[in-house]
Amino acid sequence: MNIKIASSKAPFLALGLALVALNSWGQTLRVDSVIDSLGTTKRLEKPAARVVSLSPSATEALFAVGATVVGNTTYCNFPPEAKQVAKIGGFSARSMSVEKILSLRPDLIVSSGRIHAAVVDQLARYGIPVYAYSPASFVEIGEGLRNLGTLTGNPARGKDEADRLAAELAKIAAIVATIPENERLKVFWEVYDEPLMTCGSSTFQHAIVAAAGGKDIFTDLSAAWPTVSGEEVIARAPQVIMGADDHGEKMTYSSIASRPGWSQIPAVKDKRIVLLPTELVSGPGPRIAKGVYLAAKALYPRLFP
């Protein structure tokens, strides 16, 4: 007598498939851990779908990686869509409204690091994750783009943006490498006129000058924004004077040439006063390579048509 016993594997097989599916679903929600600009490890339970940005550079980076930005500052104007986003205040922590930020129900806030410590400390009690985006180098901008892509569920786009930036900078670097050291132009970067301030070797402006093939005349100063004298600038004889274009009438050829003794500076004699777009050279945004290119073109127009 043959007795057939019904297989009991089917129910277990179905259960196993269900568990695999559930595990896969969980993996799509899980966000890899990243390290922000303050060295803090961040990990979200799921990709951030409502992000508030506290700086223009962070806003640009977030839009570049495809994040959904629901709040930013009055200074955030790129891309154009950023202007349509709800405003939470100006750039300083003092000008920002914690109540407005909370009303936007963010699941991630992107700050500029310690400069926003006051508002971040207030938000900490509500348990909203904060990622500090304050890159100190071109490489760190790329890392920031990757991290923001990861946190917002767009890791591939974050990687693509980082790779694009690296490729653009590498292309410029390859051309700059052909310029003999003794033919590289000396540059004075003017940050402010009264008091006269320049950029130190730890700033992005210094990095832009170097990447563009220029020789910063104050590369020996490590402070971020050191005050210098007009006599020092004259003595170091820059061949080009650069700055951001938000100086207005303070940085025209006539105003600079009228400064005592400055008419003898090579840059003034040759009328090589260069103003670069503020939004491209004043912060660690994803368009920084465009700022470097414009600086390089101003220095060596034959090499950068």
Image (spheres, helix red, strand yellow):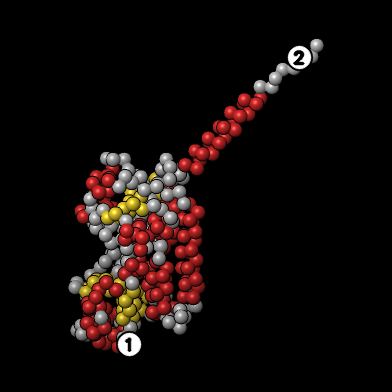
Assign the N terminus to one quadrant of the image: top right
Q: Label 2 vs label 1: CA separation? A: 104 Å
Q: In which quarter of the image is residue 267?
A: bottom left
- Residue at 69% x, 22% y: name it: 7
Name the one closer to the observer, 98 or 224: 98
- Residue at 44% x, 52% y: name it: 149
Label 1 sits on a secondary structure element that is loop
Residue 153, given in percent of the width and then of the height, sits at: 45, 48
- Residue at 36% x, 60% y: name it: 81
The answer to whether residue 149 is above or below residue 236 is above
Tell whether 199 sits left or right of 45: left
Q: Tell me the crowding category of disc 1: few under 14, some 14 to 19, or many 20 or more residues within 10 angstroms, Cα based.
A: few
Q: Which residue lies furthest to the right in this view?
A: 1
Label 2 sits on a secondary structure element that is loop
Can the viewer see residue 67? yes
Q: Name the residue carrying label 2.
A: 3
Q: Tell me the crowding category of disc 2: few under 14, some 14 to 19, or many 20 or more residues within 10 angstroms, Cα based.
A: few
Q: Name the residue carrying label 1.
A: 270
Residue 90, given in percent of the width and then of the height, sits at: 24, 58
Between discs 2 and 1, the one toward the N terminus:
2
Residue 301, given in percent of the width and then of the height, sits at: 43, 82
Name the one closer to the observer, 108 or 13: 13
Which three-letter amino acid code belongs to the residue tagged 1? Asp
Can the viewer see residue 228? no
Which three-letter amino acid code belongs to the residue tagged 2? Ile
Mark nearest the camera among 2 and 1 is 2
Q: Residue furthest front?
A: 84
Name the one closer to the observer, 143 or 23: 23
